[in-house]
Amino acid sequence: MSFALDEEHAALRDTVREFAREVIAPAAFEHYERHTFPYEIIRQMGKMGLFGLPFPEEYGGMGGDYFALCVALEELARVDSSVAITLEAAISLGAMPIHRFGTPEQKATWLPRLTSGEALAGFGLTEPGFGSDAGGTQTRAVLDGDEWVINGSKAFITNSGTDITAFVTVTARTGTRPDGSPEITAIIVPSGTPGFTVAPGYSKVGWCASDTHELHLDDVRVPAANQLGERGRGFAQFLRILDEGRIAIAALATGLAQGCVDESVRYAHDRHAFGQPIGNFQAIQFKIADMETRAHTARLAYYDAAARMLAGADFKRQAAIAKLHASEIAVTNAREATQVHGGYGFMNETPVARFWRDAKILEIGEGTSEIQRMIIARDLGV
């Protein structure tokens, strides 16, 4: 068993690491403070092929695997989580449902634009007032001839309101099953469709340069052909997408945790107190050693989950473990990195201040820590 990256993944890691340090890092603070979407960075990432990493070449992808996406996300998040979550959501939540469940026509229509980074797409599952109760979908869709008529709202939807957002895939109740449970179907809603309204962006604690909106659908009409996958299988499809996405979020969280180590090591060398670098003090050394240990174990967890997924083995529990552990240690590392930096860690121009603000959502988005614990326990038969 080897946890070393092969030549292809190592080259990708090095390329993304250099791009993150030389291109993203200098622009991160301004985008974060102004809450502006980094279109110029997204365009460059598209030209690098990052949005096509796990997709077939026939649709403009790079022909890589899901692990390649995870490797790239870790490197991006070492510098800026807003950019990292934009890529993660664009692939895992935007394009992957089309790739997994779309018809040949839907794939041919949408995937080339998504894999090139020319367009983004959103994943409309969460609704106001329901959160973790994703099965409590209240949005409804009714067939009227050869059109779906959709009414409802979605909340906290990433990449849903940019100038290059092409569509949002939403879940909606389309009927009732024999056992009384709702029949939930996934439907593609193109941007600009009459009745489809994107609310102003949220004022968020973190991820300030990523795009997040509430969505409203009022008698939105789309062709019946916009149904994604089998009718009534929308919720099950999205659960599969979320299982995969948890590995990607674990990689992103690991990157943030490692970024905390990077910045703390740098600061420990540069900052002097009592006539010497603060890195000479055991209290600082122990904090940084513990931070590195957390990041290392989080990386092993997401590597394991990704390996199981790519091997076709059951990975649901391992994905939940990776996401739970990585998100929680990211929060801890961000807090400790801020402590290492002292008063400067409380200043927004320092990277660790952004890491601290960005970390908390990792314990909430794509399944809270409580949901991950439920998944793990149930998979163990508890």
Image (tube, helix red, strand yellow):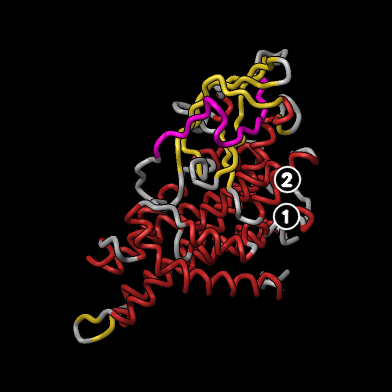
Q: Looking at the image, which residue sits at the far bottom?
A: 275
Residue bounds of the magenta highlight: 183-200
Main SS of the magenta part reads strand
Q: Which residue is mark 1?
A: 55
Residue at horizontal 45%, vertical 57%? Answer: 38
Q: Quadrant of residue 201?
A: top left
Q: Which residue is mark 2?
A: 99
User: Is 265 in the magenta?
Assistant: no
Closer-to-camera residue (320/355): 355
On screen, residue 47 versus residue 37, left or right, reads right
Residue at horizontal 58%, vertical 27%? Answer: 135
Closer-to-camera residue (190/83): 190
Residue at horizontal 56%, vertical 35%? Answer: 124
Q: Quadrant of residue 234?
A: top right
Say above or below: 176 vs 3.
above
User: Is 190 in the magenta?
Assistant: yes
**Residue 5 numbered tag:** none
The mark nearer the N terminus, 1 or 2, is: 1
Disc 1, disc 2: CB below 8 Å? Answer: yes
* Quarter containing the N terminus: bottom right
* Quarter containing the C terminus: top right
Residue 212 image offset from top left, x and y in percent: 45, 42
Query: What kind of element bears circle 1?
Result: loop
Please rate how many residues cluster around mark 1, counting C-alpha atoms within 10 Å: few if below 14, some from 14 to 19, many from 20.
many
Residue 163 image offset from top left, x and y in percent: 50, 46
